[in-house]
Image (cartoon, rainbow, N blue to C red):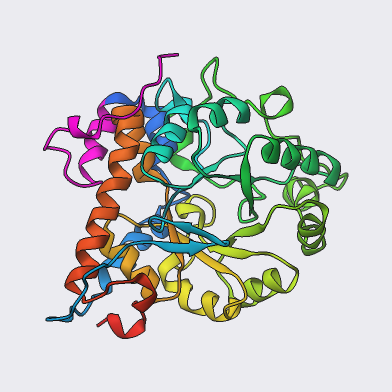
Amino acid sequence: MTGLRPPPLDRIPSTLSCLADYESLARERLDDGAWAHVAGAAADGLTAQRNREAFDRLTVRPRILRDVAGGATAVTLLGRRLAHPVLLAPIAYQRLFHPDGERATAMAAEAVDAVMVVSTLASETLEAIAQAGGAGQRWFQLYWQGDRAATLALCERAQAAGCEALVLTVDSPVTAFRNDLRRAGFRLPDGVSAANLPDGRMPPPGGAGRHPVFDGAMAAAPRWADVAWLCGAQPLPVLVKGVLHPDDAAEAVALGCAGVVVSNHGGRTLDGTPASIEALPAVAAGVAGRGAVLLDGGVRRGTDILKARALGADAVLIGRPATMALAAAGALGVAHAVKLLVEELAVAMALCGLASLDDAGPELLG
């Protein structure tokens, strides 16, 4: 492990001027397996491609000659005032991409006031991540652990390590067809594992039936009753991640969830789904103001954040771009990637005549 230091944002070369600039540098530094892990998608990659294309189809309509003095990118999320609406999405096994892994991401998050969502499959312990992240705000992305007792024990450990919310990911109970990973012959290298789980891996699926999907992995997956139980069994607010249907969003908040994350897992699970931004308006309508609405999938520019806000999202998460920045430049890269997005967002707001993100509504879009 290398020693961690606060990221010196003034040392970023001018060639890294947007998130896309990190991609080629990350590719140079990652082997084929690690690259497939971060850049690839399920099956033919149609959903991953659609996430980006759907943003590109949306246009914003600037408003001129408006007074935006005193404007800010701040938002309120789960009762906390945040400097901006950019969160770092949960990414598994970050030591695949940089020796400092999640510790570097946690330090970067603290440096730029970004919430870090720590993955169940983090390659660093929750305690090490908390130490590196200092006073930064962290949430915990939860994969169901096969039974309630094991799941609750993991949640309690996350809370003890300073995590302030749970993000229950429900859209990947079955292993997807990741052809890119298979072609690359991907396997976790020695020394990289799920550091917070017994044996460094997810528990094996249960079920005694004959079919490995329906009677195996799906038999161990959570149900709505488990979501309701989780909301009541521990004190942290719960968000359900992987919501694309408004009825599922309505069910989640009715059962006590604090919000939902509109997500298709970055196109990594089921290929052929709608883009996250396409599903957002209906999901936001399903929540109907009863909880927070977040979005991930395809966010690459500050204008994308503005588009998401206009369609009902309170905040966005970035996954692949942050991971590529981590691979390219460690904590410094991640901090810079967030800083770029927030600066782009501020410029977009000003040019659209918005002093507050609360003023971004559907009329902003062309």
Query: Picture coordinates of residue 239 (x, y %)?
Result: 63, 59
Q: Residue at x 78, y 55 (%)?
A: 230
Quadrant of the image occupied by residue 183: top left
Tell me if I can see residue 183 in this picture. Answer: no
Q: Horizontal placement of 364 versus 194: left or right? A: left
Tell me if I can see residue 28 in this picture. Answer: yes
Query: Picture coordinates of residue 217 (x, y %)?
Result: 74, 46
Where 283 falls versus 171 (above or below)? below
Q: Horizontal placement of 160 versus 19: left or right? A: right
Q: Horizontal placement of 71 versus 64: left or right? A: right
Q: Residue furthest bottom?
A: 363
Task: Report how many numbered discs are placed on residues in the image.
Answer: 0
Q: In which quadrant of the rendered image does the N terminus lie? A: top left
Q: Residue furthest right?
A: 208
Q: Who is closer to the viewer here, 222 or 14? A: 14
Say if the magenta span includes residue 100: no
Q: Residue at x 38, y 61 (%)?
A: 74
Query: Picture coordinates of residue 64 (x, y %)?
Result: 13, 81
Q: Which residues are magenta?
A: 1-28
Q: Horizontal placement of 322 versus 1: left or right? A: left
Query: Picture coordinates of residue 255 (x, y %)?
Result: 75, 69
Q: In which quadrant of the rendered image does the C terminus lie? A: bottom left
Where 282 falls versus 313 (above or below)? below
Say if the magenta span includes residue 27: yes
Q: Main secondary structure of the magenta part?
A: loop
